[in-house]
Image (spheres, grey):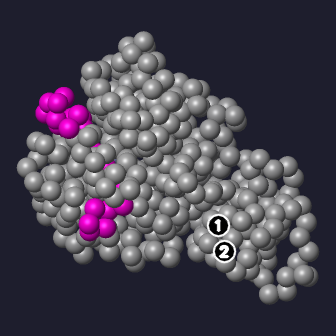
Amino acid sequence: MILIKNARILDKDGSMDILINDEGRYEEISDKIDESKHSNCQVIDAKGMLAAPTFINTHMHLDKVYTSVSGRESVEETLEESIKIMHDRKRKYVVEDVKNRAVRAIKECVAYGCTKIRTNVDIDNMANLVGLKGVVAAKEECKDICDIQIAAFPQEGIFNNAGTERLMWEAMENGADVVGGMPAAEWLDSYAKKHVDLVFEIAKKYNALIDMHMDQSKDMFDRSMEYTAVKSMEEGMQGKVTGGHCTSIAYQNQSHAAKVMEILKIAEFNVCTNTQTLAIMGVDNEPRTRGVTRIREMVEMGINVATAQDTICDGFHLYGTGDPLDYGLICAYTAQYNTPKTARIVFDMLTKNSAKIFAPDEKYGIEVGNVADLNIIDASNVQEALRLRASRPYIIKKGKVIAKFEKKQTLI
Ligand SMILES: [Zn+2]
């Protein structure tokens, strides 16, 4: 049992006490819990710090992490070139190496208070299932500290990459939980539609969620997102389909984009914008674009928008720490969210909006009966948490303290 005293819970007034039972669930939350009645429990004094549910990162590429530690050799700095840089790496994938890199990234993410990660893993005729095997092994090794979902991700397309259709089915039999997709990689629009159809066929067979890289281009004529959203309604999968990046819509004319966003809303389509990777990748002519989706319009319309890390130090992106407050801050910059109210939108993107993507039918948050996954953050409010990428002295998963993150500066 853990008794947390004097915590400030988001959306609750004043200082609160939180009692977590031996099953790792919230037993009681009130303004005062008498610790003498709970003699065997660990008492934590939160000293007025923020208590918030742990972060969820719904878009990662654990098979690729740290493949560019010695540098990212890119000339054009475009998405297309980044994909090519990764070809060579993928051909050289070794299960043990993928596993070790993925474990390192998972542990670093957990130490920042992120206890659920959905990762894509490349499935194609270069990586075959090697990346998947490595990430499945990492998932097993880290199962007590992080819940991992694996999306089978056909980065190179399905119908212009011979063998990938078969490998996608095999991936679902070998540890993938979510069906990924990348229709923009297909050569023809007709292939892109077939690609989306196959993703739904596999998802239906395995009762799996769908999370596709969606219209990830600066081509204003990409049309897979509306096709996918309508398909999710036809297949009764509203709320179970997520699009990552969704950049094409930012380049489309307003009347078409407005129509697409209306469809997304009706289809309860989730959007995950990964601004840290995209704002840096894809060098434009002046005036430069931010390369991200229509975050503000979508949020204002009530579309569920999350943000995620995407990549850490690989062929796509030289930087990245795995700290949600790090990539959340960059999302605030790219979405131009610059008030306490909009900082809260960013914080929700890192937490409850991501929870809707990760497990749409599960309860989430600091409420009696829910699983006690929470961070104690040394900040007075969410904008300060983001601004400072503040210390997190207690990272708690299923009622156990599993990590802490200490930000330390010393003036000598
Ligand atoms: Zn991605």
Q: Position of residue 292 (x, y in %)?
A: 41, 32
Q: Which quadrant: the N terminus? A: bottom right
At a point 33% along the width and 27% down the height, the residue shown is 248
The quadrant where residue 236 appears: top left
Q: Which quadrant: the C terminus? A: bottom right
Residue for badge 2:
24
Q: Which mark is residue 371?
A: 1
Q: Is residue 401 left or right of residue 264?
A: right
At a point 39% along the width and 71% down the height, the residue shown is 139
Q: Are there few (<14), some (14-19), or many (20+) residues within 10 Å of tag 2?
A: many
Q: Is residue 288 left or right of residue 76?
A: right
* Residue 344 appears in the picture as rendered: yes
Residues marked 1 and 2 touching at CB (< 8 Å): yes
What is the total number of numbered labels drawn onto the structure image? Answer: 2
Q: Position of residue 264 (x, y in %)?
A: 46, 30
Badge 1 element? loop
Q: Amino acid at mark 2?
A: Gly
Q: Is residue 332 left or right of residue 171?
A: right
Residue range corresponding to the magenta coloring: 172-194
At a point 35% along the width and 72% down the height, the residue shown is 138
Q: Is residue 85 left or right of residue 308?
A: left
